[in-house]
């Protein structure tokens, strides 16, 4: 499958051949949905936690004697019916939302999304990407030269590049990821996908083992 190649000035410099086994795969929306839902669940952080009667302070001493006071029987101030006591059936950190998806399903869903980006002309392939300095202004002008201005963009790097990552941090709608860490959820979170030609080789070496 052929695709146009751009330079850092946003001009077309030719075409490049993409591997069919990655960028020309039939899309199964049910599989993609299953993988993305599992990734969202696995990233979910359990923050809400209400203390039960075994976690709140106090309660070591019986509030009053069992009989003879005319009041109801109580054994601990940590009881849920007391103010400051434990919470009954409250949210806890023991909840587990993780979902297991096998490696082949994750990989196939990734290829399907990449294929969809190519078919919808949402993949922009670069000859190369280099920044002399970690300057936001340089990265911003580079993005504006490409036909994705004003849209969300995921920039895929073939390897760690501190200059590019630092320069991209303050640009709205722009995220960066290394090719070896590419995943379905990040791909679907951005409309356009930008990657140098070297990133294609990294994807092939990483996911087609």
Image (cartoon, rainbow, N blue to C red):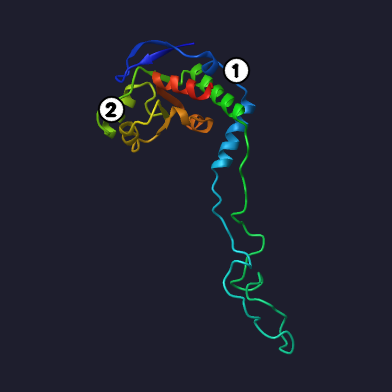
Residue 177, position as x, y percentages in the image? 42, 32
Vertical order, 15 against 95 (above or below): above
Provide the secondary structure element on which disc 2 rests.
loop
**Residue 107: which quarter of the image?**
top right
Nearest the viewer among 14 and 150 is 14
Q: Residue at x 47, y 14 (%)?
A: 18
Query: Circle 1 is placed at which residue position?
Result: 26
Say if mark 1 contacts mark 2, CB within 8 Å: no
Asked whether, in this view, residue 205 is left or right of residue 101, the answer is: left
Q: Which mark is residue 121?
A: none
Q: Residue at x 31, y 34 (%)?
A: 167
Q: Residue at x 41, y 24 (%)?
A: 194
Position of the C terminus by quadrant: top right
Query: Circle 2 is placed at which residue position?
Result: 131
Residue 53, position as x, y percentages in the image? 63, 68
Provide the secondary structure element on which disc 1 rests.
loop
User: Distance of mark 1 from mark 2, alpha carbons?
Assistant: 36 Å
- Tell me if mark 1 has few (under 14), some (14-19) or many (20+) residues whose alpha carbon lies within 10 angstroms of its own: few
* Residue projecting furthest to the right: 67
């Amino acid at each position: 499958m052929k695709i146009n190649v751009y330079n850092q000035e946003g001009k077309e410099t030719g075409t490049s051949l993409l591997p069919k086994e990655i960028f020309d795969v039939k899309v199964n929306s049910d599989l993609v949905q299953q993988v993305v839902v599992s990734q969202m669940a696995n990233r979910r952080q359990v923050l809400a936690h209400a203390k039960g009667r075994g976690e709140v302070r106090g309660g070591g001493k019986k509030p009053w004697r069992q009989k003879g006071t005319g009041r109801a029987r109580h054994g601990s101030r940590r009881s849920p019916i007391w103010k400051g006591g434990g919470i009954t059936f409250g949210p806890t950190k023991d909840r587990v939302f993780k979902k297991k998806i096998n490696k082949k399903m994750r990989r196939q869903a990734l290829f399907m999304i990449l294929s969809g980006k190519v078919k919808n002309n949402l993949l922009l392939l670069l000859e190369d990407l280099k920044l002399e300095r970690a300057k936001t202004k340089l990265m911003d002008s580079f993005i504006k030269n490409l036909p994705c201005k004003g849209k969300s963009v995921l920039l895929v790097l073939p390897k760690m590049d501190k200059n590019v990552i630092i320069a991209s941090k303050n640009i709205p709608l722009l995220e960066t990821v290394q090719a070896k860490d590419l995943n379905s959820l990040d791909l679907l979170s951005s409309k356009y996908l930008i990657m140098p030609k070297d990133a294609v080789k990294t994807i092939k070496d990483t996911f087609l083992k």
